[in-house]
Image (tube, helix red, strand yellow):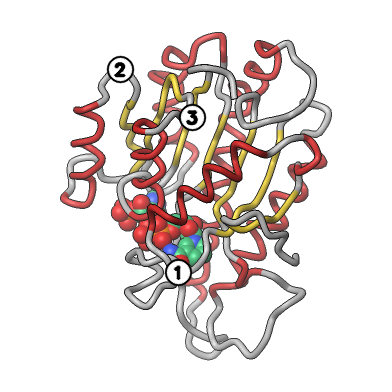
Amino acid sequence: MAAKACSVLITGANRGLGLEMVKQMVESPWPVRQLLACCRDLDGLRAEGLRDLAKKHPNVITVIRLGEYSLCSIILFLHTLVGSLVGKAGLNLLVNNTGVLTYGTMQTTSTQKMQAAFNTNIMGPMDVTKEFLPYLQAAATASGKPGMSCSKPAVVSISSTVGSIATIKEMYSFFPIASAGLNMLTLCATEEFRKDEILFAVLHPGWVRTDMGGEGGAIDAPESVEGLLCMMDSLTEKQTGAFLDHEGKVMPW
Ligand code: NDP
């Protein structure tokens, strides 16, 4: 990757995998010049770790309030902040990391609960990607180099292998529906923006010991994120539209 060339935006950056990504990106040789770390409650207890990191790296991390996904809040901060931060170089890497786990079946899940899961896991990534498109396109122009990578424009969605239609087994939760939706959204966007040289990929982080993954998870967040960053670093035009896990294994759609 090019030295200190990247501007990166991460959603759901205040805890779990998002916070660990911010940490590893600023504290490792990952070449991040500008890191826009988004969360919905900047002042809350759950953003304490992110606020501390931002204090330690004030020239790199900017913490941005990205509320319950609504276009208005996105546009508001977009116009006031992001353009001036990323400048003409544009945005190189957008990581759609925010997600919510919904338990329940058709008989126990209300329309409202399902709608909320779709809003967070599908509409959120779609709205954020759409609104940042001009900055991603600016990064493609600024790069002036052929090919695709995460130091040119790229959109990486952190999704789950439970959204895999090909491998569905006995399942008592509706969570896979939103994951499958995000996966398909990514595939459609891959084709729509191939001509703009914007790389799209879906990454599965493994079963990770976070608030979402629970204590029984197979790995901890640092190990998962180390793998995810390694994957992001290795992506090229050959992997646009790929669905990989944190170890680089190809996941079935
Ligand atoms: P966590 O539950 O630890 O963190 C979720 C993050 O998403 C938090 O920053 C949370 O913010 C944010 N968030 C949730 N709902 C909303 C919302 N409506 N609006 C704005 N922000 C919201 O999850 P993980 O870190 O474990 O997961 C990160 C990603 O990885 C998710 O997309 C998840 O689906 C995926 N994943 C995780 C696995 C695991 O084993 N952990 C397995 C497979 C996939 P707040 O603090 O404000 O709630």
Disc 3 packing (10 Å; few <14; some 14–19; many ≥20)? many
| Mark 1 or mark 3, earlier in chain | 3
Give the secondary structure at mark 3.
strand
Which three-letter amino acid code belongs to the residue tagged 3?
Answer: Val
Disc 2 packing (10 Å; few <14; some 14–19; many ≥20)? few
In the displayed structure, 2 sits above or below 71; it is above
Residue 174 vs residue 2, the one in the foreground: 2
Residue 34 vs residue 226, the one in the foreground: 226
Question: Which residue is pictured at 33% across the width and 27% down the height?
Answer: 61
> In the picture, residue 192 is in which quadrant?
top right
Residue 2 in picture, x, y percent from top left: 58, 19
The quadrant the N terminus occupies is: top right
In the displayed structure, 97 sits above or below 250; it is above
Q: Can you identify the residue that label 3 sits on?
A: 8
Q: Can you identify the residue that label 2 sits on?
A: 59
Q: Can you identify the residue that label 1 sits on?
A: 101
